[in-house]
Image (cartoon, helix red, strand yellow):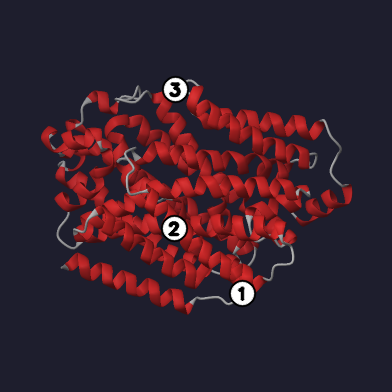
Amino acid sequence: MINELLLVAYVALIVLLSFKLRQGTFSGFVLSDRNIAYPAVIGIAFTAAYFSAASFLGGGGYGLVAGMPWVVFCTVLHVGFACLAWLMAGKIWAMAKQYDAKTVPQLLEKRYNSPTGKVVLAAIMLLLYTVYLVPIFKGCANLFQGLIGVSYLQGLMIAVAIVAVYYAVGGLPAIIWIGFIQGVLMLVGAVFLYGGLFSAGGGMEIWQHIPENVLSMQGLNVPWQKTLGMAFSISLGLLALPDLLIMIFSAKDRKVVRFAGIWGPISIGIYALCIFSLGILAYGALSAEQLAPFIKNPDGLVPFLAVTLLPKGFDGLVLLAAISAAMSTMSAIVLVTTTALTSDILRYLHPDISDKKTLLLTRVVGVSILLIAAASAVNVPQQIVPLVSVSMGVIACCVFVPLIFGLYWDRGNQTGFVASLLASFFSVVAWNFFGNPLIHPVFIGLICGTAAYVVGSLATNRPNRVQVASKSKAL
């Protein structure tokens, strides 16, 4: 009964905030008119949007099969990339404001004067973000099963209904403010689980109960090279995922971005250490019989820990935190995916379409994408982590190369931009099917994308000097 009451209160708060923050203009809906003035809100919402159910469920349990390398690589890379992301955030915000860019494809289109590149990137985002939503829906449905005892299908339906409401009504303002609340819940839940395992394992004595092969950096059932690739691929998203970059775009000024860069890495560090340690700590707190079912399906470990280790009510809070992780990511992804279709592709084909009609389509199409992804999640046999690693990695590769070079290398041009998109996308897809499984496809995508960008830019004309000078002065 406690869990049901927690869920009702949570949903009521979301609906209330969504209507309070609703926007009547396209710019307000997708960018909050660049008026978010609280650094903590942006920094923690950034963390919430990045860490989804894939982290709370897949990431929390994956240490069972990957061992200590998963904890070390994920924590170090997440904190390191988070610091780099926020160091660059001021430049990214200034470029977005200068170009009045409302989406990442628009930002890169204006930087490179390439409508073709914008459409190609928008199409890649539309395809892969829809795929990325599927494992997140899987995780969310599993969490509703654990929280209130509904079936998997009913859990999917509840998830769609809640996210659809605050996406369609409130847009980015609701996503950011609700994401802030969800981020706080996620941090509390992660700390509770981490503390619960230590308590069950006898405090610091828990390390004496964990087998040596689990703590070895050689890896457990997954080679350390493969673990490193997955951790790198997922962490790279902190630097380049469009659903995170739009939160930087929404800041009121550069000062807000600067101070958000304190809250972001700190919250990411706390969350990453707590969550990614759960799998190995479980070896020191649970019996072999308790662990056995989760070796083949590590995605179920976190709900089990919440119900087994925590008092009634606290388990509901942890599961609600995990649901928050899923929903904050889903809402941001749906926004950038939908605007990629309506604002970037549709407006390219029909430039005269009005803002009012674009806003309506953005709401309707977003709900449609949610329904498609949820339907695809009805039967998902794969583990969450590998699915997220590939889909997130491809998007991050495609954005990372032209974004970073666009910020720091004036010689890059539209040929290099389009070449890097195609090279990154197709090399990752090809390597995923035909390459060495110990080398993650994202490494290949970064190498091929960078090479294509540099060669394409150097082999063709320089960008317009007036445009470059204007950009450099603004940044």
Let me know if residue 451 appears in the view: yes
State which tag comes first along the sequence, 2 or 3: 2
Secondary structure type for disc 2: helix
Q: Which mark is residue 370?
A: 2
Residue 446 appears at what percent x and percent y? 60, 32
Let me know if residue 94 appears in the view: no
Q: Nearer the viewer, residue 340 or 263?
A: 340
Q: Residue at x 55, y 27 (%)?
A: 430
Residue 21 appears at what percent x and percent y? 49, 76
Secondary structure type for disc 1: loop
Disc 1 from disc 3: Cα separation: 48 Å
Amino acid marked by disc 2: Leu
Relative placement, left or right, of 127 versus 187 is: right
State which tag comes first along the sequence, 1 or 3: 1
Please rate how many residues cluster around mark 2, counting C-alpha atoms within 10 Å: few if below 14, some from 14 to 19, many from 20.
many
- Read off the residue under disc 1: 25
Q: Residue at x 62, y 63 (%)?
A: 255
Q: Residue at x 20, y 45 (%)?
A: 197
Q: Is residue 108 above or below residue 426?
A: below
Disc 2 from disc 3: Cα separation: 33 Å
Secondary structure type for disc 3: loop
Depth check, mark 2 against mark 3: the one in front is 2
Please rate how many residues cluster around mark 1, counting C-alpha atoms within 10 Å: few if below 14, some from 14 to 19, many from 20.
some
- Read off the residue under disc 3: 438
Which quadrant is home to the N terminus?
bottom left
Amino acid marked by disc 1: Thr
Depth check, mark 1 against mark 3: the one in front is 1
Q: Is residue 212 above or below residue 315?
A: above
Depth check, mark 1 against mark 2: the one in front is 2
Relative placement, left or right, of 236 versus 133 is: right
